[in-house]
Image: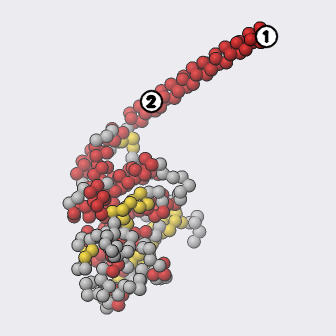
Amino acid sequence: MSDSKRDGITKDFLTETDKNPSCIMPEKLSLDSPLKFECHPGVSCFTACCHNIRIVLTPYDILMLRQRLKLSAHEFITQYTDPIYLEKTDMPGVQLKLVGDKQGCPFVTPEGCTVYADRPTACRYYPVGMADFHEAGQEGGEEKFFFLVKEPHCKGFDEPKTWTIRAWREDQGVELRDEMNKAWLRLVMRRKSFSLQATLSEAAQRMFFMASTDLDHFRRFIFESSFLQTYEIDQETVEQIRQDDVALMHFSFKYLANTLFGAEGMNMNKEKVAAKVKSMRHEQEENLRQLEEEYKQLKAEREAQRQKDEAARKQS
């Protein structure tokens, strides 16, 4: 498969771990492929996969967990996460902060997960990973397939329960997470495709982190700055993002795509644009005028020095 035909293989990094790559089974699976697997408290390795693992949190993961815990975004991020860079890019994100001697998820107990209904996306995928091929230049031109992550310690594969990949994903609530995470993942993968040849500015990194991780801060940014005067946003959208966190999250992805990659969908207020252009022109004119004055002054100083040198030469 040539690079010219594909816009890149966007393997879902939410399923990646620091485990040996040999744990990934070399078999391409479909939604209808069988899966013999079950995890429950009676399995001898129960909760073992919740330790010594890198659990990257998506914006939707953060939203669901902090709402469950009744915490602000800042409180949740500070208490439960560590900062990371996403998928070997310069895009900042967070992962769950592991705790204890066994470096476990902060929400796991010997009895199981205390936030199971709102557990992160990465936990829902295991042990079924997903790969996503995206056709270059085609909207919706996606080809998905699935693979198994089969680690030696996991005894879930010895259980008699048999599903299809489709039934497993439905049982784990993956489809909703895929939909909620899709636009954010596209941002990260798009950034990864540029490599680090052109780095994000510190301001761009701060904006990405705020808009994708701290929705409370992003909402204040929208409603307490000149944002709504700068961008043309219909009143229905304004009311949605004022009250609905999910709507605000999706809006943040749209805003970041426009700001970081020039994607369509965000229009600036024409009067603001005209005023900005006028301000820039005025600034340029002032700079040119100042440069001209400095040049004239320098020329006059040089002429005075020339005359002084000439007078001194004649006197000698």
- Name the spot of residue 188 as percent of width and height, x first: 44, 60
Residue on which disc 1 sits: 316
The residue drawn where x is 31% and y is 40% is 225
Residue on which disc 2 sits: 279
- Name the spot of residue 5 as percent of width and height, x first: 56, 66
Q: Quadrant of the N terminus?
A: bottom right
State which quadrant residue 184 falls in: bottom left
- Which residue in the rendered view is the most extreme toward the top? 315
The residue drawn where x is 53% and y is 57% is 196
Q: Quadrant of the C terminus?
A: top right
Three-letter amino acid code at the position of disc 2: Ser
Which label belongs to residue 265? none
For residue 272, say whether it is visible: yes
Left or right, 156 with reference to 274 = left
For residue 124, say whether it is visible: no
Q: Is residue 97 above or below residue 290?
A: below
> In what element is the residue under mark 2?
helix
The residue drawn where x is 22% and y is 51% is 243
- Name the spot of residue 189 as percent of width and height, x first: 46, 62
Residue placed most toward the observer, 293 or 61:
293
Left or right, 257 with reference to 291 = left
State which quadrant residue 82 falls in: bottom left
Q: Are marks 1 and 2 in contact (CB under 8 Å)?
A: no
Q: Disc 1 to disc 2, how far (Cα)? A: 55 Å
Three-letter amino acid code at the position of disc 1: Ser
- Which of the two discs, 1 and 2, labels the residue nearer the N terminus? 2
Left or right, 265 with reference to 2 = left
- Name the spot of residue 211 as percent of width and height, x first: 35, 52
The residue drawn where x is 40% and y is 50% is 206
1 vs 2, front mark: 1
